[in-house]
Amino acid sequence: MGQLDGKVAIIAGAGQTAGEGIGNGRATALAFAREGARLVLASRSSGPLEDTRDAVRAEGFEAEIITADITSMDDCHAMAAAAMKAFGRIDVLHNNAAIGAFEGDSVNIQPEEWRQVMDINLNGAAFASKAVLPAMREQKSGCITHVGSIAAVAMYPIIAYKASKAALNEFTRWLAFENAKYGIRANVLQLGLIDTPLAIEGYHEATGTPREELRAQRAAQVPMGRMGTAWELAAAAVFLASDAASYISGAVLPLDGALATKIG
Ligand SMILES: NC(=O)c1ccc[n+]([C@@H]2O[C@H](COP(=O)([O-])OP(=O)(O)OC[C@H]3O[C@@H](n4cnc5c(N)ncnc54)[C@H](O)[C@@H]3O)[C@@H](O)[C@H]2O)c1
């Protein structure tokens, strides 16, 4: 028995940034498939998305894919419609899509970059949620999980990203409050420092710090003494999407090796 048997899940941001290891989107897709979910995988670039689908298929599972940019309301509607067409329902929206920008200081904010971060991390989360809610309300059940970040509450000099993830937490709490009467749950998985290609390559490019030095610096910040893995995020995402989490809604759940305990 899989924890997600019978469920239809959309994973937005299911491709992966190039680099060593596995990212959160791809690990979540594989974990959901292994637990029995039928999948619609979405991402804005088709190549990495096809690679995720192929990885799912290589394990003997099936997944539909759709190229969709969550900053486009039309694409979000198309993503929801793809799930309805393929499977007739939407039980889970797991939104992993996000980008970062390293400003370092408020005077370095680049307006276009700021807008792009907000557009994907916050507006996209709202648009993707809006697109799946009618089907979930009709079913009187559903689960929306947004992938957040400890940057929402900690002081990292990634300012647009921080602001977008802080707003995402409150948006998700609103979703939970407003949609509880429809049997829909909404939560944030608030990640700490995870060893993914996006994080390591992103910081490497922004700061020029060698990758191994970056990994060591990140691990040293965490009370557990190591970064998390995409598989640890995926396991929590499976739990939140499963019926075992049926009374959990409006939560901003830290997944950070106790990193947030260092704040205040
Ligand atoms: N890695 C970390 O240390 C860390 C820490 C905190 C939070 N997070 C969060 O984890 C998530 C990303 O995980 P990852 O680091 O493994 O990256 P990832 O490899 O899963 O890549 C993110 C995916 O999002 C997709 N995407 C980006 N913009 C999109 C858009 N507009 N529409 C559709 N898809 C889009 C990308 O194409 C890519 O497939 C993000 O929500 C990020 O904020 C990561």
Image: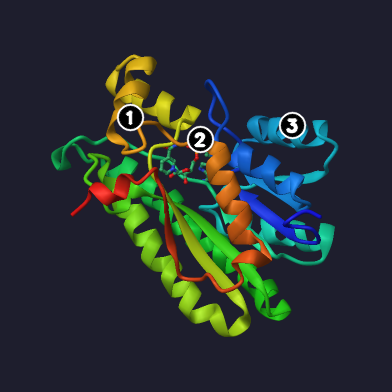
Which quadrant of the rendered structure holds the N terminus? bottom right
Q: Position of residue 15 (x, y in %)?
A: 61, 37
Residue at image coords 54%, 79% = 179
First in sequence: mark 2 vs mark 1: 1
The residue beneath circle 3 is: 55
Q: State the residue position of label 2.
A: 229
Q: Which quadrant of the view contains residue 242?
A: bottom right
Viewer-nearest of discs 3 and 1: 1
Residue on which the image places disc 1: 218
The residue lying furthest to the bottom in this view is 181
Screen quadrant of the C terminus: bottom left
Q: Amino acid at mark 3?
A: Ala
Label 3 close to label 1 by CB (< 8 Å) = no
Quarter of the rendering containing residue 76? bottom right
**Percent position of residue 151, x then y:** 31, 47
Residue sitting at x 76%, y 37%: 56
Label 1 C-beta lies within 8 Å of the nearest ligand 1 atom = yes
Alpha-carbon span between mark 3 and mark 1: 29 Å
Judge whether residue 101 can be spotted in this image.
yes
Q: Amino acid at mark 2?
A: Thr
